Image (cartoon, rainbow, N blue to C red):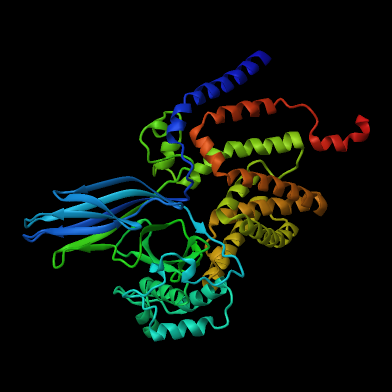
Amino acid sequence: MNKSFNLTIKVLIALAFISMSFKIKPIKESFENFLPSKVYKVHYNFYTKANDKKIFVKTYLPISNERQRIVAKKEQSNKMTFKIKKEEENIRGIWRAKSGSKFYTINYSFVFKGKAAQYKIADNLPIQTSEHFKDDTYVRAEEHIQVDHYKIDSLANSLTKGTKDLKSLIRKLYDYVYQIPSAPIRDLTSALKAFEQNQASCNGKARLFVALCRNRGVPARLKGGLILEQTKKRTSHLWSEVYIQGKWIPFDVLNNHFAYLPAYYLEIYTGDHFLITHTPNILFDYNYEIKKGNNVPFINATSDGGLLEHPISFIGLSKSNLISQNILNFLILLPLGGLLVALLKNVIGLKIYGIFLPILMAFTFTTTGLVTGLLLFFIITIVVMLISIPLHTWGLLHTPKMVVVLSASVILILLLLSIGLHYKIQWLQSLSFFPIIVTSITAERFTRAIEEDGYNNAIKKMLQTLVVILLCYVVFSSATIKIVFLVFPELFLIIIAMSMLLGKWIGLRLFEYQRFNAILN
């Protein structure tokens, strides 16, 4: 028996390490340091007709920077010449056709990998002037950014009167422009027009904010791009950047992003330009087709071959639409969570509620967030306790009692969602049923323990369960651990081997050394 057991352990570990050794080369080929949180496949789709004359179509193309990577670029068009032209900070794609009354289609596609950019502006910074910035391009007036107009000058002066530091100055200008009512105005709106009509879309608000900053001598510029979401759209987006301590800091006065740019913002060009231009008076149509991609940290998921095609790897499964990323993450981390719970129970000696309940709770915290999850847990625990006490007093059987508890939990989540919707509380609006149900089951186990073991023992067991939940949460939140298991599913064999060894554990648990200290001495 012991020989076959030991042989099984050795075979499992040997198979795991042998299989992993064949992945060293693919890992080197696919590894990348950039860690995006959002991945999208973007298509520019243009349609035009020549009408017996030469035509052109021009558009700005995105480039990689510190917060975004643009890869897998591909251009397709029917009988049109294509070239890329560098224009100051931007690059531009240009398509041309000689003549002929025919339709032309253009497709330019790429993969966007992005991460959020959050900047902290120090307090008490001196207010910058054009002297701090060598190039005066970003402090002077432009056609649609009327920096020196008396109305802009009067507004900027009244808003910042008495302001002594840069952060406060920018905040006052930002707050004024943000409170201007938003409107889906498709036409170009200048800074002056946005102020005069007290209503604007992203382009009018961004121009007004830039004009106010420049009026105070603070370098500012426009930034254009797309807000990425899985859809087909025609609308682009415009926001602002302010030059602060050697960096261009983003500000979106439409969507209230102060010194912050979300991961799903695609930066395409800098300056006050039109994203698309074409020959006047021709038939022209366009759209942006955007598809969400699965993000695999540390792995260049756009590369061909390598780990994507490796027979013993889940990277390809992660990129496919066969299973959602959340479910896949849960499946690959479930055995690891089980091993962690077994170690804490059998070796450390923690007493917890169930084996998989702490794992399920930890996973729900990854979807709700740790603080929200804990708050939700305590609210539901108290509610379930209050419901369970009379149910136990009335002598209800366990299964009908659970139906009552779950029904009360459903009513509770619907009430919380309604409160979140009415008072616009974001974290309440994002609640889902699965975390609520799992939390309710855990809370019910806690109330049953109070009935059977008393408050002190039940609370001790609940605290130890929370410790296990938090440890599992730390493991489940790690992008590194997720990618390791995606690349090396052979680790499941090692987990099986370790669990088998743990099944033979006959020594004292760590907490039992203290418990039996007198006897041992």
Q: Nearer the viewer, residue 374 or 287?
A: 287
Above or below residue 340? Residue 429 is below
Above or below residue 489? Residue 417 is below
| 433 lies left or right of 52 | right
Which x, y percent locates residue 309? 39, 32
Image point (70%, 35%), residue name: 343
The part of the image, by quadrant, that contains residue 417 is bottom right
Q: Nearer the viewer, residue 290 or 125?
A: 125
| 370 lies left or right of 277 | right
Q: Nearer the viewer, residue 489 or 20?
A: 20
Image point (37%, 56%), residue name: 230
Which x, y percent locates residue 64? 39, 50
Which x, y percent locates residue 124? 61, 70
| Quadrant assignment for the C terminus | top right
Is residue 256 something that shows in the picture?
no
Which x, y percent locates residue 448? 73, 51
| 190 lies left or right of 508 | left
| Quadrant assignment for the N terminus | top right
| Residue at the extreme top of the image, as rendered | 3
Numbered label tally: 0
Is residue 348 something that shows in the picture?
yes
| 54 lies left or right of 291 | left
Above or below residue 162? Residue 305 is above
The part of the image, by quadrant, that contains residue 274 is bottom left
Image point (42%, 38%), residue name: 317
Q: Nearer the viewer, residue 495 or 486?
A: 486
